[in-house]
Image (cartoon, rainbow, N blue to C red):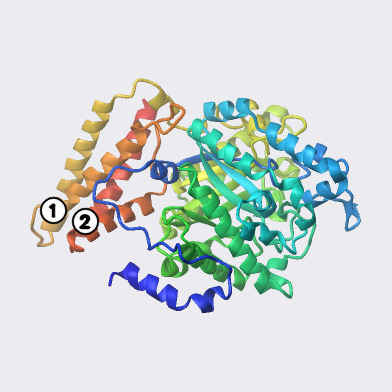
Amino acid sequence: MTVFGKLQEKAKQKLSDQLGDLNINTKAAQPPPQPAQPGAQPSTRQLYSFRQQRGVNLGSLYTLEAWLTPSLFTNAPESQGKQGKSELEVVQGNGQEAKKLLENHWDNFVNEGDWNWFVQHGINTIRLPVSYYHVLPGHGDPAARNLMKGTPYEPHSSIYADCLPRIHALFDTAAKHGVGVLLDLHGCVGPQNDQHHSGVSSSFPGLWKADNANDLQKQAIEILVVLAKEFADRHENMVGIELLNEPANGPWLAKFYEKALKAFDQAGVRPDLPVIVSDAWATQFYSAWLGDGAAKVTHRHVAIDYHLYRCFTEKDRGTAIEDHANGLDLGCKDDNSDRGHTASWLSQMSNQANRNIIVGEWSSAVSGGSFECSAHHKDGHNARRAGRTKWGTSQLQAFEEFTAGNFYWTGKKEGKPDAGWCLYGAIEGNVLPSNLDPNADLWQSNWDAGAAAQYGKDEEERAWGGHKSYWASRGGDGVHDRFRRGFAQGWADSTTFWETDIGGGRKGNLIGYTGRWVQERVEAIKAAEGNPKDAWEYEEAMKQALRAWRRMLGEKRQK
């Protein structure tokens, strides 16, 4: 029995202990994904999900936030002595008009002009925050609709009955533009945190601490299975599902993730659907957990989501904006300085996670204190904008270097231009570059495919020669053909990602989840060729090829 088969049998044996009495149909359970044939061309799904993701959040399109769309909260009643800031108060305060109000918002907040603008400025993926009540009321399966029972939104289910088709339409619109969609369960039953953006005004994360927390967690996993199956089967541009947004961290969270992963496998959720888990700001723990926990319960692709903000804590407010930016200085290795310390940390986390890491939320915002303690705080508006620009671009460069993707918070918001929290404001205010794809000029101009191929051949010869020389100097022999094949495969894959148009005339994609991509290629070799002892050479060569491709692009950008 293969390792994957043993893992599957072990998961089945422990199913009742791990999942309890979850109401999940396991008859359609699928085996772990089988390795593709060596050298198989990437599928459309793989091109979407494995490429470097340069994204934006569509915040407050579905799961509402008062500071982003305050006009919707005009009639929101008080909650806990303050004006309600969650979507539940919007629904409660608008009565019979709530359905019309929300449907008008869903239909008009993001329009065709926005999609065109996003694509023109380098966006290739969106992170879509939704809540359980946006999907379940309009679901065709009565069992799915039944999951609304006992929730604060159950009395308002009819308001959301026509929301699900709109979400499907959004996936279709995104695909037309060659844009992927990361579905994020922003508001869960419980809720999962104490924030208004969980869908309720609550300071109590009931998913973990309520008397019926176990029941709520089972319900949450059933909801996640419904969401995953509903969208992944229909949309090739679904790049993943994020289990929970910013959940309260504790000993319960990793266990919940592992139960959800097992439930996905048992319920027949597509085995090629990536699962994203929030690191709950415990990045070191969860980047290690990918190998120590997730890999032991599923063969599914799992990645972590880190949110980077520098405007909420006392330390953030007391740090000058230029120092925030200097922390992401990629070129600084001075141990006696704080320059580059954030970049160094992010690099370590990425290596530990095998690059299975994204930054699901970030912004160019800082607090007023970061401007006040800046050395340039008296130099006026232009100096403030220059500081914000350095902060924003430093983040972009670090994310491109160390992660598989990033998603700016947020795409749109009501009110005056906001260069800190709105992508429109950041780009049009020259805080961020006009195109978030640093290679846009290369693939949009006259790309010389022949020159790129020759570069690859030269790099292959150099790498192969160095590899042979290294082992020959240590008494090794042989032609190391496996190494050469691995490099050629890595270069061919990079070329395919770069040259394939998956929609909207978009080319120029890089492989973002490089660690996982190489892993799947190596597994294909092992499965087809009986686990050859020199498979490690193939793996190492592929990694070198993917790095060489990025190095080539860097050289071309400098010309």
The secondary element bearing badge 2 is classed as helix
Question: What residue do we see at 66% from left, 33% from top?
Answer: 110
Question: What residue do we see at 65% from left, 73% from top?
Answer: 214
Q: Earlier in the sequence, mark 2 or mark 1?
A: 1
Residue 38, percent from left and from top: 24, 50
The C terminus appears in which quarter of the rendering? top left
The secondary element bearing badge 1 is classed as loop
In front: 8, or 67? 8
Residue at the disc numbered 1 = 480
Question: What residue do we see at 34% from left, 31% from top?
Answer: 499
Could you give the CA–CA distance between mark 2 and mark 1, rounded to whole angstroms? 8 Å
Residue 76 in view (yes/no)? no
Amino acid type of the residue that numbered disc 1 sits on in the rendered structure: His
| Mark identifier at residue 405 | none
Residue, far top:
446
Q: Quadrant of residue 98?
A: top right
Residue at the disc numbered 2 = 537
Amino acid type of the residue that numbered disc 2 sits on in the rendered structure: Glu
In front: 499, or 144? 144
Q: Is residue 28 above or below residue 547?
A: below
